Image (cartoon, rainbow, N blue to C red):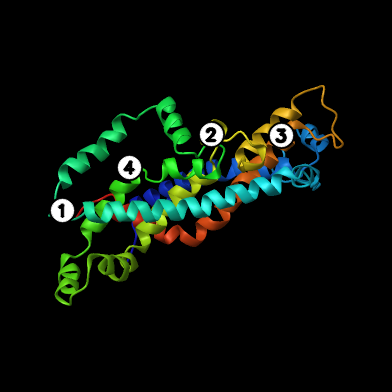
Amino acid sequence: MVIGKKERAYLALVYAILALLALCVVFPLMYVVSVSLTPYSEVLKNGGFAIFPSKINFETYRTFLLDSTIPRAYQVTLFITIVGTLVNLIVTTLMAYPLSKKNMPLRNPILMLVVFTMLFSGGTIPTYLIVKETGLINSVWSMIVPSAVATFYLLIMKTFFENLPESLDEAAKIDGASELRILCQIVLPLSMPIMATVGLFYAVGHWNEFFAAIIYVSDNAKHPLQVILRGMLIQTELPELDFERIVPTESLQMAAVVLSTLPIVVVYPFIQKYFTQGALLGSVKG
C-alpha cells in the first residue's frame, strides 16, 4: 500500500506529538531517579538539574533503609495492599455479580442507594465514630475494612458482568449449577481483565494509604510506608536535629518518591494488557 504525502505528514505529526508526550512523562521520572542517586554537590554544579548522573551515590537510600522503621513500614504497607486488595475484590465481586442480574429482587432500589454514596458521604467524623465503635482504631484493619468497596469500581465490575453472554449462565443452570458455582467456575475465569483492572486500582490506593492511617492509627509501629516517609522528610527540615548522616532534603525527597513508587512501576507492565482490556470492557456496555 502506497502512502501519500498527506498521510506521511499526518503520521509524522502524530509520532512527534506522541514523542513529546512520552518525553513529558519520562523526563520527571529520570530527574527524580537521577537526583536521588547523584551527590548533591554535583546537582548544584549542574544548576539543580541532573538528568544523567555523572557520579552515583546511594547515601540517601542508606539513610532510609538503615532506619528500622522503614522495613517495618514496608511490611505494614505490603499487608494492607495484598490483604486489602483481596478483601476489596471478594466483596466487590460478591456485590457486583448479583446486581448484574436484571431479575434480582429490589435491584433498582439497591443500585440507587449505591449510586447515592457517590454523591453524598457520611463524612469524616461519623466514619471515625463507626470505626471506633467497631474496635478498629489503632489497627491495620482500619485501613482495609472501611474502604472494602468503592462504588465506582463496583459499577465498572457490574457492567462487565452484564456484558457476559447470558447463554453461558443459562447452560450452566440447565446442568444444575448453583449461582456460586457459576460465579467461581464460569464468570471469574472470564473476568480476569476486569479483576486485574479493579485490583490494580485498589492496590495503588492501599499502597499510597495516608489519610486513613493518620486518622485511625496512632501507633508508629503500625503506620504504612507513606506516613513514615512523610515523617522522616519533616524531621530532615528541622534544623535542631543532629543526624549521623548529613543528607540534603531534596535528595531525601527524591529517594522517598522512588521507594514509594518502585513496586507499582515494577508490577504494572505485567498486568498492562489486562488493565487496558478491562478498562474498556468495564466502562462501555454493549
Q: Is residue 184 above or below residue 281?
A: below
Residue 216 numbered tag: 2
Secondary structure at badge 1 equals loop
User: Disc 3 or 2, which lies upstream in sequence?
Assistant: 2
Q: Quadrant of residue 167?
A: bottom left
Give me the residue at 36% from left, 52% from top. Answer: 91
Secondary structure at badge 2 equals helix
Q: Could you tell me which quadrant the N terminus lies in?
A: bottom left
Label 2: few (<14), some or many (≥20) within 10 Å? many
User: Disc 3 or 4, which lies upstream in sequence?
Assistant: 4
User: Disc 4 or 1, which lies upstream in sequence?
Assistant: 1
- Residue that lies at the very extreme toward the bottom in this rendered image: 175
User: Disc 1 or 3, which lies upstream in sequence?
Assistant: 1
**Residue with the mark numbered 4:** 151
Q: Looking at the image, which is closer to me, 122 or 62?
A: 122
Q: Quadrant of residue 32?
A: top right
**Residue with the mark numbered 1:** 104
Q: Is residue 30 visible?
A: no
Left or right, 19 with respect to 242, comes to left
Secondary structure at badge 4 equals helix
User: Disc 4 or 2, which lies upstream in sequence?
Assistant: 4
Quote the CA–CA distance across marks 4 and 1. Answer: 19 Å
Q: Which of labels 4 and 2 is toward the front? A: 2
**Residue with the mark numbered 3:** 232
Q: Which of labels 4 and 1 is toward the front? A: 1
